[in-house]
Image (cartoon, rainbow, N blue to C red):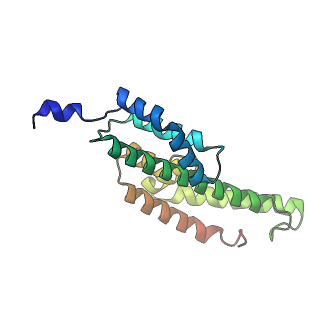
Amino acid sequence: MNTQSVNTSFYQKGDISLERIYGKYRNSFIRYAGKVLSDEFYAEDVVQDVFTGLFQQTIYFVSEAAALKYIYAAIYNRGIDLVRHRQIAQRYEEIYSNENNCVSHADGYNDLLKKEFFVIVEKRIKSLPPKCKQIFVMKFKKEFSNPEISRNLGLSLRTIENQLYIARGVLRKQTDMYLCS
């Protein structure tokens, strides 16, 4: 097999073939994302995010089947990230908006506890080791996905996950007394 025939069988970012895959399978991608999210509203956004990421990277695929496998996995992972983020946001929204919350005695007292809570959280975030803090801020304040953080910092995905686990554990110890289960 000569080198020229191998190179022409690959799909690369910006190549017409990747655009063709998008055009050919767009509706299937959106349906799949809708099933992952259990919500059709964000499905198209997830698919567009995945393809935007593909066009920004230099990725070579051996065949259309390999490209499809990668794309479906990327859609699944991006969809799961979005679902988890919405669940976390909803949980905190419920905690803070629930009037029957265990810390809501009087409005002034409740406001004071909220301020104290956020001061403690910010202090603990600032006291995290530098890389751990940077990863935590990128994940939860700037809303980067784990693969995006991994690419930006040049660290492995497993390292990112471990650092987030450590940071959440440290914060959980300090904030459990403020949050009710």
Camera-side residue of 38 and 55 = 38
| Residue at figure coordinates x 43%, y 51% from the top left | 73
Q: Is residue 96 left or right of residue 128?
A: right
Quadrant containing the C terminus in the rendered view: bottom right
| Residue at figure coordinates x 44%, y 60% from the top left | 161
User: In the picture shown, does residue 151 fall above or below 95?
Assistant: above
Q: Is residue 51 visible?
A: yes
Q: Position of residue 60 (x, y in %)?
A: 29, 38
Quadrant assignment, res 36 = bottom right
Quadrant assignment, res 4 = top left
Camera-side residue of 99 and 124 = 99
Quadrant assignment, res 117 = bottom right
Q: Is residue 14 visible?
A: no
Q: Position of residue 142 (x, y in %)?
A: 56, 44
Q: Is residue 177 left or right of residue 82?
A: right
Q: Position of residue 84 (x, y in %)?
A: 59, 57
Camera-side residue of 158 and 21 = 21
| Residue at figure coordinates x 52%, y 59% from the top left | 127
Q: Return the residue found at the far left.
A: 2
Q: Is residue 132 left or right of residue 180?
A: left
Q: How many marks?
A: 0
User: In the picture shown, does residue 180 fall above or below 21?
Assistant: below
| Residue at figure coordinates x 58%, y 39% from the top left | 45
Q: Position of residue 158 (x, y in %)?
A: 38, 59
Quadrant containing the N terminus in the rendered view: top left
Q: Is residue 87 left or right of residue 75?
A: right
